[in-house]
Image: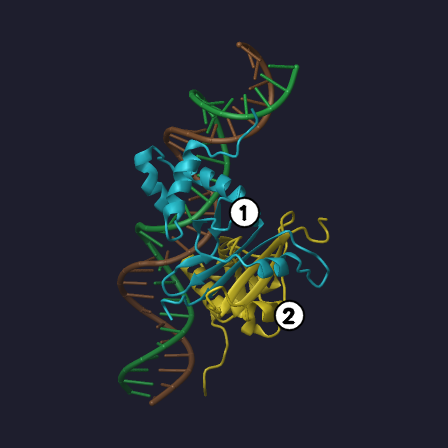
Chain colours: A yellow, B cyan, C brown, D green
DNA sequence: TTAAAATTTGTTATAATATAACACTATGTA
DNA sequence: TACATAGTGTTATATTATAACAAATTTTAA
């Protein structure tokens, strides 16, 4: 039987926590919340996070050092991420906009270089906070 | 006499260092390099960095926790930044592309929300590394 | 010019984020 | 089975960033 794309125990615990959260979670918040499940030390959390990011199950919000579950159905998108971030309430939403992805994926700079991966973070006020 | 847009002593020292660097500098690298000039502690560095970022003289590369001088002539652009990052040699270039800026500045999401600020980081291989 | 306000500085301590290194276990593959 | 790969548990430590307070400097405006 070939390798399933299943998560290991720690990966699953941490993914579940992030996935049911309505807001980005930080590594040490995650650590605190999974200690009752036996995950006791930072490296355990960071290793699971690294793997989940690599496989596109979660994304890192770089400007916040926090992690959100991918909400995008086709998660090739781990290489092409965009988020909106509210500067007031800190809410983060994943943007999945085919046009935007296409535009940025085919963007080439002045030297003609194209890039296989990007991360875009928009900042403003969400609907509630406006 | 009204306030000039001049930099304070520490801000100038730290800006000069970043400005003459060909690569993004990290806060503690900066600290190490300015100790001979009398800047001895992290808060002095971080305060200057914060101010320089606010005024658009430098930008923070979020995925690297590092800082580069703004190379864009019209530095209103501090609200609309884009960078290319080489995954091999770590080189970072600021992208100033009017079309790209315009496209992203006028982007509105599914709810019709527009965002006043964004940061975009492209990852790939630079010309040298290809 | 001079007093109040705002900004910048200097300093110590500590918080928050992240990884190195090592020994061991579990799982997948040939 | 036996080898390789991925995951786990653990301790210690490295890296990035801020809190809090006192003093000095610069700006503003009465």
Name the disc covering residue A45, or none. Answer: none
Q: Is residue B104 visible?
A: yes
Q: Is residue A11 visible?
A: no
Which quadrant would residue C14 be assigned to in this image? Answer: top left
In the rendered view, tell whether residue A22 sits above or below residue A98. Answer: above
Please give left or right for residue A54 compared with residue B108 in the image.
left
Residue shown at 56%/67% (left/top)?
A104
- Asked if both marks, 1 and 2, belong to the same chain, the answer given is no
- Residue holding disc 1: B75
Circle nearer the viewer, 1 or 2: 1
Screen quadrant of the C terminus of chain B:
bottom left
Element carrying mark 2: helix
Task: Tell which of A26 and B62 is nearer to you.
Answer: B62
Chain letter for mark 1: B
* Residue A57 location (% of width, % of height): 54, 69
* Residue A56 location (% of width, % of height): 52, 70
Real-space Cα separation, disc 1 to disc 2, in angstroms: 28 Å
Task: Tell which of B125 and A49 is nearer to you.
Answer: B125
Chain letter for mark 2: A
Residue shown at 43%/55% (left/top)?
B64
Which quadrant would residue D29 be assigned to in this image? Answer: top right
Name the disc covering residue A99, or none. Answer: 2
Q: How many marks?
A: 2
Residue shown at 59%/64% (left/top)?
A19
* Residue B29 location (% of width, % of height): 35, 46
Please give left or right for residue C16 compared with residue C25 in the image.
right
Task: Tell which of B74 and B103 is nearer to you.
Answer: B74
Element carrying mark 1: helix
Crowd tier of the residue under label 1, counting other residues whose Cα lies within 10 Å: few below 14, some 14–19, many 20 or above: some
Crowd tier of the residue under label 2, counting other residues whose Cα lies within 10 Å: few below 14, some 14–19, many 20 or above: few
Screen quadrant of the N terminus of chain B:
top right
Task: Tell which of A59 and A81 is nearer to you.
Answer: A81
């Amino acid at each position: 039987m070939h390798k399933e794309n299943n998560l290991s125990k720690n990966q699953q615990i941490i993914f579940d926590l992030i996935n049911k959260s309505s807001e980005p979670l930080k590594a040490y918040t995650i650590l605190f919340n999974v200690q009752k499940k036996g995950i006791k030390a930072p490296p355990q959390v960071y290793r699971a996070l690294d793997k989940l990011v690599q496989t596109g199950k979660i994304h890192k919000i770089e400007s916040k050092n926090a992690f959100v579950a991918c909400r995008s159905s086709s998660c090739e998108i781990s290489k092409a991420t965009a988020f909106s971030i509210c500067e007031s309430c800190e809410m983060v939403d994943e943007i999945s906009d085919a046009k935007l992805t296409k535009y940025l994926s085919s963007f080439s700079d002045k030297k003609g270089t194209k890039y296989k991966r990007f991360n875009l973070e928009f900042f403003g006020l969400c609907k509630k906070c406006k």
